[in-house]
Image (tube, rainbow, N blue to C red):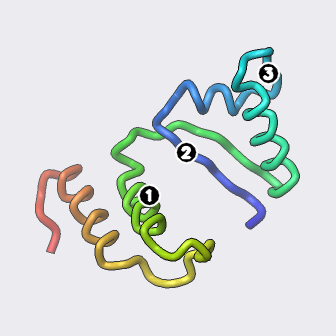
Amino acid sequence: MKNVEVESNYQTLIKALQCSVYDRAPEGILFTEIWDFARLSFSACMFSTAPKACNNLVHALAAFGASQQADLHLWLEDLPDKVLVQRDSALATEYGKVLY
């Protein structure tokens, strides 16, 4: 992966990560470390906001991954059924209809 986009519905966090100058706030060192890691690891790294509803699938996949073995770091397979159901449910709610 060379280009990465990090999305969150937490606008304050995204604004802090988009800033390249950090004050002496206690969290400043964490933002500096995140920026340094992103700059050294990827050709491009973009931080942006997205409505929470847009991240339902990501949250479901993260929850599924957290429940799996600790040494699994990269997802190479199709999405698990539980995550697909979450995606379809979110789409049905968003568009007000049931998907078949």
Closer to the camera, 96 or 65? 65
Amino acid type at image mark 1? Val
Name the quadrant containing residue 67.
Answer: bottom left
Give the residue displayed 61% in from the left and 48% down from the top. 6
Closer to the camera, 71 or 15? 71
In the picture as drawn, the residue positioned furthest to the top comes out as 24
Relative to 99, does residue 41 appear above or below in the rendering? above
Residue 8 horizontal/vertical position (percent): 51, 41
Q: Earlier in the sequence, mark 3 or mark 1?
A: 3
Closer to the camera, 82 or 55? 82
Q: How many numbered circles are shown?
A: 3
Residues marked 3 and 1 touching at CB (< 8 Å)? no
Q: Which residue is mark 1?
A: 58
Residue 14 horizontal/vertical position (percent): 60, 32
Marks 2 and 3, how far apart at CA: 20 Å
Give the residue displayed 13% in from the left and 51% down from the top. 96
Q: Which quadrant would the N terminus be assigned to in this image?
A: bottom right
Q: Which residue is mark 2?
A: 7
Residue 94 horizontal/vertical position (percent): 23, 50
Lateral position of residue 10 relative to residue 5, left or right: left
Residue 22: mark in rendering: 3
In the picture as drawn, the residue positioned furthest to the right comes out as 40
Marks 3 and 1, how far apart at CA: 29 Å
Residues marked 2 and 3 touching at CB (< 8 Å)? no
Amino acid type at image mark 2? Glu
**Callout 1 crowding tier (Cα within 10 Å): few <14, some 14–19, many ≥20:** few
Relative to 11, does residue 96 appear above or below in the rendering? below
Q: Which quadrant would the C terminus be assigned to in this image?
A: bottom left
Residues marked 1 and 2 touching at CB (< 8 Å)? yes
Q: Earlier in the sequence, mark 2 or mark 3?
A: 2
Disc 1 element? helix
Residue 21 horizontal/vertical position (percent): 82, 22
